[in-house]
Amino acid sequence: MDTKKELIAGLNEDLSYELAAIHQYIYNASVISGMSRLTLRDFFIKEAKEEMEHAIYLAEKIASLGEEPTATAKPIQRTKDVKGMLRASILAEVDTIHRYTKRIEMAEKANEIELKLRLEDMLAEETKHKEEMERLMADSRL
Ligand SMILES: [Fe+2]
Ligand SMILES: [Fe+2]
């Protein structure tokens, strides 16, 4: 596979994880109950919206590069336990941070500079998601 084909295949993989992240955060927001619901429901909805922005960007970029954007999302973790929910979402964010780090290098090699810059912004946002959830996990009441 040439550099560009490989890059687009990678972007489609990223898109399937972003679609999963939207599903995951909507699921989390819908099932969360107890006192945690007061704060975490809105937090998860906000995350879902940010992941949707990522998915829209990736889908449009893939189409602009001449390929078909995937409509298939990766599976999500179904748990109603708040700590388990946060733990699974932190791991998913870490995985995404690794994929974007790799994708940034690939975009640079393919001379797709706008893509590289946008992926850097997305990497920063995923890092923020991860760090916010790590701090939420530190709550002794959970
Ligand atoms: Fe994302
Ligand atoms: Fe995220």
Image (cartoon, rainbow, N blue to C red):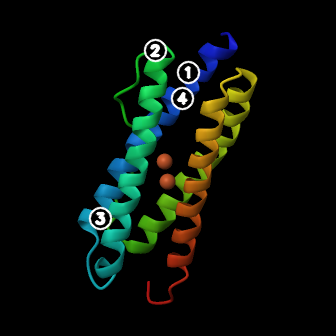
Image-based side of 71 in relation to 94, left or right: left
Q: Which mark is residue 11?
A: 4
Disc 2 marks which amino acid?
Answer: Glu
First in sequence: mark 3 or mark 4?
A: 4
- In 3D space, how far apart are the residues under numbered discs 2 and 1 (Cα atoms)? 7 Å
Q: Are marks 3 and 4 in contact (CB under 8 Å)?
A: no
Distance from mark 3 CB to nearest ligand 2 atom below 8 Å = no
Q: Which residue is mark 2?
A: 67
Q: Which mark is residue 57?
A: none
- In 3D space, how far apart are the residues under numbered discs 2 and 4 (Cα atoms)? 10 Å
- In 3D space, how far apart are the residues under numbered discs 1 and 3 (Cα atoms)? 31 Å
Residue that appears at 63% across and 18% down:
6
State whether residue 67 is above or below residue 134. Answer: above
- Say what secondary structure mark 3 lies in: helix
Q: Are marks 2 and 4 in contact (CB under 8 Å)?
A: no
Disc 4 marks which amino acid?
Answer: Leu
State whether residue 116 is above or below residue 51. Answer: above
Q: Which mark is residue 29?
A: 3
Disc 1 marks which amino acid?
Answer: Ile
Q: Which mark is residue 8?
A: 1
Q: Residue 139's x, y, as percent?
A: 50, 85
State whether residue 59 is above or below residue 50. Answer: above
Mark 1 is surrounded, within 10 Å at the Cα level, by few (under 14), some (14 to 19) or many (20 or more) other residues, namely: many
- Say what secondary structure mark 2 lies in: loop
